[in-house]
Amino acid sequence: MMPKMDSFISLSVPSLKGNELKYLADCIETNWVSSVGPYVDRFEREVAHRLGVPHAVACVNGTAALHVSLIAAGVQAEDEVIVPTVTFIAPVNAVRYVGACPVFMDCDDHLNMDAAKLVDFVEKECHFKDGRLLNRKTGRRVSAVIVVHVFGHPANMELIVQLTEKYGLKLIEDATESIGSYYKSLKGKKCFAGSIGDFGCLSFNGNKLITTGGGGMVLTNDEASARRVRHLTTQAKEDPLYFRHDEIGFNYRLTNLQAAVGVAQLEQLEKFIETKRKNFTTYRESLCGVTDLRWIEEPEGTYSNYWHYALVVDKEGDRDRLLIHLREKRIEARPLWALIHRQRPYQKFQAYRIEKALRYESAVLNIPCSVSLKEEEIQRVTEVIRSDWRVF
Ligand SMILES: *Cc1c(COP(=O)(O)O)cnc(C)c1O
């Protein structure tokens, strides 16, 4: 007899058990399926309301949201944009889409951009003249910073906002992983990730906390910026009758079908975050006392959506052994992204004192985190980790 095989536990799968089908049926019955429609407006309105921003513009995916945000922020070709080296590659690619050059920053112990090093870079390596920040080494103008709230944990915005305001830099938040995460008190009030910078970008890709299959959104507090973003995502069409266009735009709009799924997903956001946090606690308790293992946790003063659970395996080589063991036991796990500054398209750009990121690159492991994860599955994952640990 064949031994019974354990079922496969995925890293992250979507959960579509709310009103998704009902709203989709409504789109089809009413014939509103394409890039305008009541669900698009409703999705934008409800996300904006949920995250406390006045304006939200839906678009085709998170990468497109980053792209149009950079254009609307006025980032020019040959400008420099400060980016993290620990990130999914999309925000850095978006910098290149506008012809600008990335400058890579190190991470802190939450895997977010090291704000203290960012301050050092600006104050020691750049000079500020006539309202422009110039990088001494390259002679280029530094015009923006993109901050990623990695795995849902809010970055050190207090310091970063101070700095970008002081030097007139545009601030773009890549909040694609951090919908619903917030600062308990920033400048005296509760603030959601993505609502703080000049632009905040969301993603509704299938692996994100809420999904529309594929999708994104730009958040902003500035009405003119919202109008510009909307214009850019709709082919920069000035005149809907004669089709006059005043600049080069993009077909970046979200469809009503996708937005319908988004509205249904948003209704469940609160519950999803509670589940993510509860499951994290279960994992943490189950692995309590295992030496040489620690977690990336939410920074003090913040509330994270715990999109991904990130374990740090400090001993050289153990992370990769654990990764293989988990895979053998049919549990999907994933290492941290390869650092962006070392990848082929980006090796020629400046990287500023990257130290911690090098260590975390070989030490971080993501383990299954789906909202639908069952208690027994969490126990299975932690048992595999515990049992394999004794072997090392
Ligand atoms: C998912 C993700 C994106 C891109 O979003 P898409 O919707 O897949 O284009 C951008 N940045 C980060 C950090 C992400 O994790």
Image (cartoon, rainbow, N blue to C red):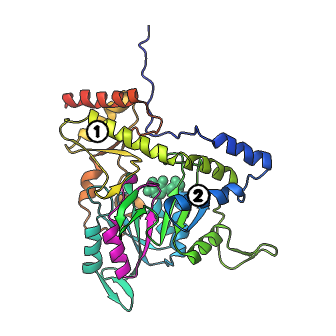
Residue tagged 2? 46
Q: Residues within 10 Å of mark 2 (few under 14, many from 20)?
A: some
Q: Position of residue 199 (x, y in %)?
A: 49, 69
Marks counted in the figure total: 2
Q: Residue at x 20, y 44 (%)?
A: 316
Query: In which quadrant of the rendered view does residue 158 lie?
Result: bottom left
User: Looking at the image, which residue sits at the far bottom?
Assistant: 130
**What mark, if any, has residue 319 been given in the picture?**
none
Give the residues in magenta.
152-181
Residue type at mark 2 is Glu
Residue 366 visible to the viewer: yes
Query: In which quadrant of the rendered view does residue 370 lie?
Result: top left
Classify mark 1: helix, strand or loop: helix
Residue type at mark 1 is Arg
Q: Residue at x 64, y 51 (%)?
A: 258
**Cα–Cα span, label 2 and label 1:** 33 Å
Residue tagged 1? 284
The first of marks 2 and 1 along the sequence is 2
**Picture quarter with the C terminus:** top left
User: Looking at the image, which residue sits at the far right?
Assistant: 241
Question: Residue 155: within the magenta?
Answer: yes
Classify 87 as above or below 74: above
CB contact under 8 Å: marks 2 and 1? no
Classify mark 2: helix, strand or loop: helix
Q: Residue at x 27, y 59 (%)?
A: 108
Classify 367 as above or below 163: above
Classify 88 as above or below 118: above
